[in-house]
Amino acid sequence: MKGRPPKPHEVHEREGTLRPDRHSPLPVVLSERGLGEAPKHLNTEQAQIWDWLVQELTGARLLQVTDAPMLEQLAVAVDFARQSRATLEKEGLIFTELKFDKDGNCVGETKKRHPAYNNWKDSVTVAKTLAEHFGLTPSARARLGIQAAVGLSAAKQLEKTIGVNPLDFLEEQNKNDDPS
């Protein structure tokens, strides 16, 4: 989605910019219903992440049964970020690639960034984007007009889990993408 995300009904109401002909009422649906067990095809780590997310989001009444596919993707993205970070911690950010001639003799070497870095970065980006859609970051909760979502500390949990604060990561990405 390009451009600024649309403001929720409650925000327009609070700011005095509500136009019933343009703004649909109450886009954030609070629900008592949650989700059950993690899908069977998730691995153990992903299932644990699923369980934690379901507990947090159900407690805040922000989860619908129809959210299951995106919640699954969030759990997988967080797990991929963890795996990539573990690989980087074990093998390092930079590796040496040896170059050989046609006879098999080493003719040089090149230092390169580990491919797991791009996997980590992509997983963090996906996890952060999905976390925002579930209202798991302070800015997402403010944008959604959720004043006090009880029990939500997901940005801190994601920071602990994947090694970066999702908000800091997005800010850095926006700086890197800015052509000026």
Image (spheres, helix red, strand yellow):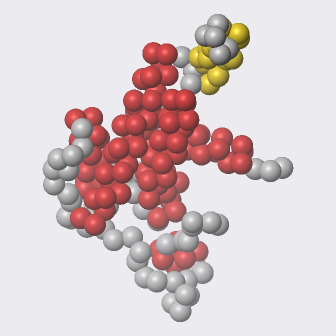
- Front residue of 166/111: it is 111
Count of number-bearing discs: 0
Residue 148: image x %, image y %? Answer: 39, 56
Q: Is residue 38 above or below residue 103?
A: below
* Quarter of the image where one finds residue 64: bottom left
Q: Residue lying farthest top?
A: 105
* Quarter of the image where one finds residue 114: top right
Left or right of 179 on screen, residue 43:
left
Looking at the image, can residue 60 be seen? no
Could you tell me which residue is drawn at 35 percent across and 57 percent down? 70
Q: Is residue 177 above or below residue 17?
A: above
Looking at the image, can residue 96 be seen? yes
Q: Residue lying farthest bottom?
A: 21
Q: Is residue 24 above or below residue 58?
A: below
Residue 132: image x %, image y %? Answer: 47, 54
Left or right of 7 on screen, residue 46:
left
Could you tell me which residue is drawn at 46 percent across and 83 percent down? 24
Q: Residue lying farthest front?
A: 103
Q: Is residue 86 above or below residue 13?
A: above
Residue 27: image x %, image y %? Answer: 41, 75
Q: Quadrant for the N terminus, please.
A: bottom right
Could you tell me which residue is drawn at 51 percent across and 29 percent down? 116
Residue 82: image x %, image y %? Answer: 40, 31
